[in-house]
Amino acid sequence: MTKSNSIYIIGNGPSLNRIDLSKLKGKDTISFNRAYIAYSDWGFYPKYYMTVDAIVLENIKEKVKELIETSPIEKFFLPEWSREYFGNNNKICYLNLRGSWFLNRRIWGNNFDRLSIIANVGATCVPVLKILGYKNFIILGTDCNYVESNIKNVDIEYNPEDKSGRRIVYKSSGDHDPNHFRADYFGKGTEYSKPQQGNHYKGWEFIAKRMKKKKVDIILCSPGSRLSSLFSEGDFEEIVRKY
């Protein structure tokens, strides 16, 4: 295994605060959604950036456009439908996300046209990164311990009649986000889809099962993560020296 085959998947859960991310400077990394609020704290930009949630992307599209135009991030992975926002740019790889991830047997293809959203952006990025040639995945800040009862200052719920909850949108009126590495992650004025906690775990479970059939290794460095039942755990300090 070589460093060139390895990438750090930087999730946005609270356990990220227990890791010295400055040690990832110069490593291959990918981050998601509103993680950019901490890039200056980390001391580096990720190599890749990805977002797939329609509500989140609509809310942050101007910031994403700014990152595309001014940051050293090498590649942005965005859903095909967002081309109307960002146009054609060689830094953008548009993903033709379609079909149900639990039915689509071809999500591990050799191109970006046969992919599905797999419950959350973190799980969805794994087949994308595999297409790029990565074989070792180190997962950080992916706790899968979302606690809805602790959410404060949520002003709005759209489409509450949707029993599935998939189209419910929250809008925060304050910086009280308990489910991410910063209280202002989904802070005042931000909108986001109601997370489907059970579905998120099932998405990672799906990834874990598919890994057994592929020459891909996943190491979990997210202290306290619910995903410890799915992936082998590693010590971040040791992992960062090895990969």
Image: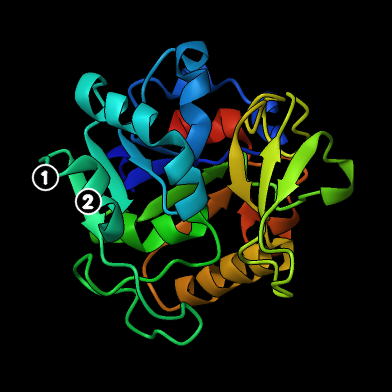
Report helix, strand or loop for mark 1.
loop
> Which quadrant of the structure image shows residue 235?
top right
Q: Identify which residue is drawn at 21% across, 33% down.
A: 74
Q: Amino acid at mark 2?
A: Arg
Asked if residue 114 is positioned above or below residue 95 in the image, the reply reads below
Q: Is residue 218 left or right of residue 65?
A: right
Q: Is residue 195 left or right of residue 24?
A: right
**Residue placed under numbered mark 1 in the picture:** 88
Residue 132 appears anywhere in the view: no
Q: Position of residue 7 (x, y in %)?
A: 38, 42
Q: Is residue 166 left or right of residue 242?
A: right
Q: Identify which residue is drawn at 66% across, 69% down.
A: 199
Q: Amino acid at mark 1?
A: Asn
Of 129 and 237, the residue lying toward us: 129
Report helix, strand or loop for mark 2.
helix
Contact between marks 2 and 1 (CB within 8 A): the answer is yes
Q: Identify which residue is drawn at 33% across, 22% down.
A: 26
Mark number, residue 36? none
> Which quadrant of the structure image shows residue 57?
top left
